[in-house]
Amino acid sequence: MQKRKLGKNGPEVSALGFGCMNLVYAYGPPVDKKYAISMIQAAYERGVTLFDTAEVYGPFVDEEYVGEALASVRDNVVIATKFGFDVDPITGERHGLNSSPEHIKKAVDASLKRLKTDYIDILYQHRVDPNVPIEDVAGAVKELIDEGKVKYFGLSEAGGATIQRAHAVQPVTVVQNEYSVWTRDPEHEVLPVCEELGIGFVPWSPLGMGYLTGKVNPSTSLDPIYDLRASARFPRFTPYALKVNWPVVELLELLGQRKDATPGQVALAWLLAKKPWIVPIPGTTKLDHLEENLGALKVQLSRDDVKEIDEAFASIHLQGARAPEELLKVHDIGANLGTSSAEGHGKSPLP
């Protein structure tokens, strides 16, 4: 397994991680506990050492699966989880965002219990809270690090200004925003800030919610109940968008023919070729898809290959935003294309 270091002062992890969300939520019915644990262990057995989860996945049960699956190899892996939503511990119902220091500490104690561990490697703020200064959030995480409950601090869907403000209080080790061949939002602001500060970057949805694999095509019927792409009306997954955006997949297929690789492998290899401190976390519920994803590590893209993809993509008129408007609104200023936190302080209020 190839290894990468998450930023200047972060942990060394496998070059590809494993996103565990899909096991309980998002793109189809959840799998049962035994199968979920077997998938996590299968990833570990193939060399994966970075596992990503969150309290809100399930909610709660995804952390339980990760904890049980990795208990016997705990010190050999890096477990990342997230706080930031106000989730009822009894009903699992969400009540908006909550990153108050008191809530963070309660959430971490609950996550530690579910994960069957006494420390969390990477603790992310899942979404920037517009009601809590990021300095207070970073200060609370700093205390948890001092107590030994957390090793590294991360932010998700944060813009440049918020990252810089948090970093001044407690060094940010890694940022996790959506990034892929067809989602370029981090390029204008977030990636430059990460490079400047020595922060690692973890792209979530590196395969474009499955579309970039070519397995979700214009004739695919998405489950209206269990599939978030259909139930939440993601703009890129309408029947029309699935059809008109297909040239993106054809672009990856064309290069894949020369590299003896699938479109999904080329999409992952493209991310790996961008920066040495980028570690994608594709997720899946299928063993053959896991092995296909890991096969991307054998695909070497040159600078010319990356340039070819970027130039061809620039000529494609993509249909649809990367998420519904109500979800985009939860992202920080500067995390979405069309917004900028330059000369500002982001969505987080000033202290």
Image: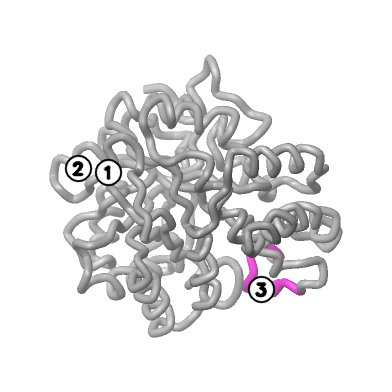
Cα separation between marks 3 and 1: 36 Å
- Dividing the picture into quarters, in which one does residue 155 lie? top left
Cα separation between marks 3 and 2: 40 Å
- Dividing the picture into quarters, in which one does residue 307 lie? top right
Q: What percent of the width, then of the height, locates residue 31?
A: 49, 80
**Residue visible at 34% across and 28% down in the picture:** 167
Residue that badge 1 annotates:
152
Mark 3: which amino acid? Ile
**Residue visible at 33% across and 73% down in the picture:** 45
Q: Which of 213 and 139 is in front in this view?
A: 213
Mark 2: which amino acid? Ile
Q: What percent of the width, then of the height, locates residue 142?
A: 23, 37
**First in sequence: mark 3 or mark 1?**
1
Cα separation between marks 2 and 1: 7 Å
Query: Mark 3, mark 1: which one is toward the viewer?
Result: 1
Q: Which of 276 and 342 is in front in this view?
A: 276
Mark 1: which amino acid? Tyr
Q: How is the image coloured?
A: one colour
SS category of the residue bearing label 1: strand
Quadrant of the frame with the C terminus: top left
Residue that badge 3 annotates:
225
SS category of the residue bearing label 2: helix
Which numbered dot is residue 134?
A: none
SS category of the residue bearing label 3: loop
Residue that badge 2 annotates:
145
Q: What stretch is highlighted in magenta?
A: 221-230
- 235 relative position to 134: left or right: right
Quadrant of the frame with the N terminus: bottom left
Q: What percent of the width, then of the height, locates residue 277?
A: 41, 41
**Residue visible at 33% across and 38% down in the picture:** 173
Q: In this rendering, is residue 200 above or below 207?
A: above
